[in-house]
Amino acid sequence: MPDSHSPKEFLRFLKPRLPEMLATLRRFVIAESPSLEKSAADRCCGVIAKEWSKHGVRVERISQKYRGDILRITYAPAKSHASGQLLVLGHYDTVYSTGTLAKMTFRVEQALFALQALQHLRAQLHKHIAFLWTSDEEIGSESSRKYFEAEALRSDAVFVLEPSFGSRGLLKTARKGVGEAELIVHGRASHAGLAPQEGVNAVHELARQITRIEKWNDLRRGVTINAGIIEGGTRTNVIPERARAVLDLRALRVSDMHSLEVRLHGLRAFQAGARLEITGGFNRPPLERKMSAALFAHAQLLAKQMEFSLGECTAGGGSDGNFTAALGIPTLDGLGAVGDGAHSSHEHVLINTMPARAALLAALLAAR
């Protein structure tokens, strides 16, 4: 097929495949894959690997010691003049423990059918395609990060199969950076009645620090600091010598992320004799919109040719796309399933949207 293949051709091929999509989805859902249960995750990894192995691609299973294995799948059609690489990034781990059998958001299998559309229509790809399915995204990507970052650095663009936002299927063109910091105040204990002047009240100091930090919130810029855990004191008649707060940190811009970390670690005590201990910071950088803008504009154009509209949003949470964008690689997120209720008992996929989402991914991969 010539390079000028129409996105509608991908959609025409995929619409009749919806029953097969649902059957594949069921196989993947039944193979439960909790992030913290390696044996269960590995079984699911095997189910996914078996499915992909049917379609003329190279399937590599990367062993992990404590987490589920990582799947790396590469596709370069015969007689292809493709150079460079595109990365399709997703994860198969879930927040549900074994036995839950809740519906899992449709990520990996969507890419499988996008691949079948590319193969069936003999699309002349301009680049090789790597698919990477990780097993610990829900718990911070500590084990898999080095693998997908290395893959991203070999790629010209990254397409992240996180679920889209809401029933309108919005792509996520910006995501907040996410972090956690701990603020501990060390004071001095004393009897609250007999010698209050000899004590340094750590709880009072912490309250003043939180009041100070609260003023740093800037919703317009997407900067939020939330004191989510507060601890301190032992008895009402004791001046508390220790108090602790755990802070959730979020920012939309790398510059704001760094500024917030500097301000946090620069805090000084109000009370003489109090000492502050500050640890932590951002562990996932922002995905700034400038890293998604061109890819999103192209996706919108392709969607229009398939006669459906495509919107965008900013997400407050992070994904592995935050890391790839921070490396300077153009990254488009939210290309996965259309649905709602993530991480809840009513998590679901709008099944009639599945062929169009797979067709959009196929068209993006063919056009780059």
Image (cartoon, rainbow, N blue to C red):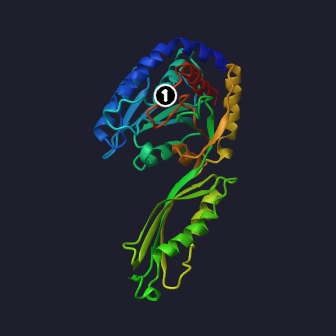
Tell me if residue 144 comes above or below residue 304 in the rendering: below
Q: Nearer the viewer, residue 93 or 59?
A: 93
> What element does badge 1 sit on?
strand
Identify the residue shown where x is 58% and y is 29%.
82
Q: Nearer the viewer, residue 241 or 1?
A: 241
Identified by mark 1, the residue type is: His
Badge 1 density bin: few <14, some 14–19, many ≥20, Cα 10 Å: some
Outermost residue toward the left?
39
Counting labels gives 1
Hey, which quadrant is residue 184 in on the image?
bottom left
Query: Is 183 on the left-hand or right-hand side of 362?
Result: left
Query: Whole-percent x and y of residue 194?
Result: 40, 88
Query: Whole-percent x and y of residue 101?
Result: 36, 29
Tell me if residue 44 comes above or below residue 242 in the rendering: above
Query: Whole-percent x and y of residue 65?
Result: 30, 46
Outermost residue toward the front?
193
Query: Is 122 on the left-hand or right-hand side of 295?
Result: left
Hey, which quadrant is residue 350 in on the image?
top right
Hey, which quadrant is residue 198 in on the image?
bottom left
Q: Is residue 367 visible?
A: yes
Q: Which residue is mark 1?
A: 348
Identify the residue shown where x is 56% and y is 77%.
268
Query: Is 178 on the left-hand or right-hand side of 2?
Result: left
